[in-house]
Structures are given as C-alpha cells and as structure tokens.
Image: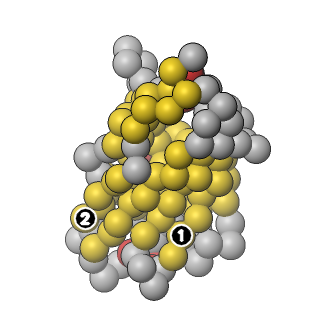
Amino acid sequence: QVQLVESGGGLVQAGGSLRLSCAASGRSFGSAAMGWFRMAPGKEREFVATISWGGSATYYADSVKGRFTISRDNAKNTVYLQMNSLKPEDTALYFCAAHKGSFGTSQSSDYNYWGQGTQVTVSS
C-alpha cells in the first residue's frame, strides 16, 4: 500500500517556475517507478513525466520536454517535478502516481496508486 500527497502548486505568471513535491508512505516506494500526470479543465488526464525506481531513467511528454524535470529522493520517499518556463496551457490539476513496476510508462492504467492532486495555475 502506498499513500501519496502532493504539494507545491499555486498561481504563477507565464515564464515562472514551480516545484511540485509528492510525499509517499509505504514500504514499496523505493521499488516503484513514479509518474506525474495532469488534468486541465474540460480535458482528459494526460501523462507528464515518469522516473524509474532508482532515478536513472526518465521520460517526458513532448509538451513539457526541456522545461520540466522529474527527480526523486528515495531516502525521503519523495518525488519532485521542477517546472520552468511555465505557460498558461500548463494550468491543470497535477497528480503523482506510483507505477505497478520499476520502470515507468505513460499509460495511466499502469499506475495503481494516486494522490489527490495539487493545482497549478499559470496566468498570461
């Protein structure tokens, strides 16, 4: 069992930065890949980024590549999403999720634990 709590969201101007955190509890955190997803108003949930269990492998959606960075600290049971050069279209509710395996994928059905989300709003 893994419980996930996101934090760090807020209101920021276009071009600004935010760092999201996801604190995890549960014995399996260190062996699970982790991912970030987002859901904008009126849109379906979409993949943002994923990181393997040890942090050596990452993968990003094309829409955030070069602007967002996912990382993790297994000693702190925390995964991060550093978001730079934010755009209004990045406005969404951001969720972290724990993958069923050790290497992440972009499919939400491959993740079996989800947080409640943290809101990110980017003003133009």
Label 1: which residue?
72
Label ID, residue 3: 2
Q: Residue at x 42, y 79 (%)?
A: 76
119 relative to 32, above or below: above
The 10 Å Cα crowd at callout 1, few under 14, some 14 to 19, many 20 or more, is many
Q: Amino acid at mark 1?
A: Arg
Dot 2 or dot 1: first in sequence order is: 2
Give the image quarter of residue 86.
Answer: top right
Q: Mark 2 falls on what kind of element?
A: strand
Residue 94 in the image: x percent, y percent? 41, 40
Residue type at mark 2 is Gln
Q: Position of residue 97 (x, y in %)?
A: 39, 55
| Image quadrant containing the C terminus | top right
- Which residue is painted at 28% across and 73% down in the image? 25
Task: Report the Cα–Cα distance between label 2 and label 1.
Answer: 16 Å
Q: Dividing the image into 4 quarters, which one contains the N terminus?
A: bottom left
Q: Residue at x 34, y 54 (%)?
A: 6
Nearest the camera: 121 or 24? 121
In the structure shown, which secondary structural element does the residue marked by tag 1 occupy? strand
Picture coordinates of residue 74, whole percent (x, y):
48, 80
Residue at the image position 47 percent from the left and 65 percent from the top = 79
Residue 105 appears in the picture as rendered? no
Q: Is residue 69 left or right of residue 53?
A: right
Pair 2/1: label in front: 1
Residue 106 against residue 44 in the figure, above or below:
below
